[in-house]
């Protein structure tokens, strides 16, 4: 008398599944055309809209050029504090570098950076926007974006292009109000 454990496992398997029919090979299908790579169409559209809106803003007001000094002071900020900012005499507590960012990315990064600066109660920050020398013969886009955006914010007391040793006209020092 033979025991099942003495039998060949492959033979047991074949006995359990029964007769097997071989499948026919399918007719050769034509090679599938590769699908196009996915694109971030929503992000592209948002960036295009932001660029369009920004281009209108630049047309309606005279934009800053690469070597121009960005400068703004609230009326209630004492002149001596503004002079200290212009000379770079406040210690910079944080810095944001926008090199290589698109308009939409730069705006998002800048807004987030300012929120975090307030959360950490920073009084002075530096924003590096570059001089915009790569801007297709037009005005430096990021520099003008930073200038326009900072002017609209209630939490910005003043800003001024950094002294030469701290980025010059490719960066701004920003004095923030404590909330």
Image: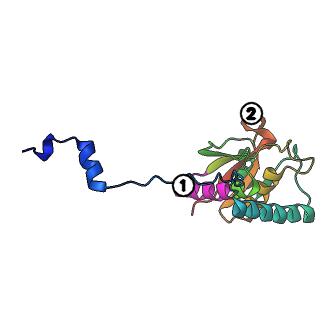
SS assignment at label 1: loop
Residue 40: image location, x then y, percent: 69, 58
> Is residue 139 or residue 50 the one in the foreground?
50
Above or below — where is 97 with respect to 103?
above
Say whether disc 2 or disc 1 marks the residue closer to the N-terminus.
1
Q: Is residue 150 left or right of residue 26?
A: right
Residue stretch rendered in magenta on the structure: 108-123
Assess whether residue 118 is covered by the magenta stretch: yes
Residue at point 91%, 50% (across, down):
138
Q: Is residue 21 visible?
A: yes
Q: Is residue 87 left or right of residue 155?
A: right
Residue 132: image location, x then y, percent: 83, 45
User: Which quadrant, please, contains the C terminus?
Assistant: bottom right
Assess whether residue 46 is covered by the magenta stretch: no
Q: Which residue is mark 1?
A: 121
Kindly report the distance in space between the C-alpha atoms of the residues bearing marks 2 and 1. Answer: 25 Å
Q: Is residue 74 visible?
A: no
Q: Which residue is mark 2?
A: 165
The reply to whether the C-beta atoms of the residues labelled 2 and 1 are less than 8 Å apart is no
Q: Is residue 139 left or right of residue 94?
A: right
């Amino acid at each position: 008398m033979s025991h099942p454990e003495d039998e060949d496992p492959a033979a047991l398997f074949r006995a359990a599944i029964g007769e097997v029919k071989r499948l026919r090979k399918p007719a050769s299908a034509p090679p599938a055309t590769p699908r196009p790579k996915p694109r971030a169409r929503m992000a592209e559209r948002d960036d295009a809209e932001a660029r369009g809106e920004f281009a209108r803003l630049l047309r309606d007001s005279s934009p800053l050029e690469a070597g121009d000094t960005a400068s703004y002071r609230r009326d209630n900020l004492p002149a001596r504090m503004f002079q200290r900012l212009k000379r770079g005499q406040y210690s910079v507590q944080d810095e944001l570098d926008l090199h290589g960012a698109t308009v939409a990315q730069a705006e998002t990064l800048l807004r987030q950076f300012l929120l975090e600066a307030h959360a950490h109660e920073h009084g002075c920050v530096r924003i590096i926007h570059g001089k915009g020398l790569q801007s297709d013969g037009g005005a430096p886009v990021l520099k003008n974006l930073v200038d326009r955006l900072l002017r609209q914010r209630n939490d910005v007391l003043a800003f001024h292009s950094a002294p030469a040793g701290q980025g010059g006209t490719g960066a701004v020092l920003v004095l923030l109000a404590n909330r």
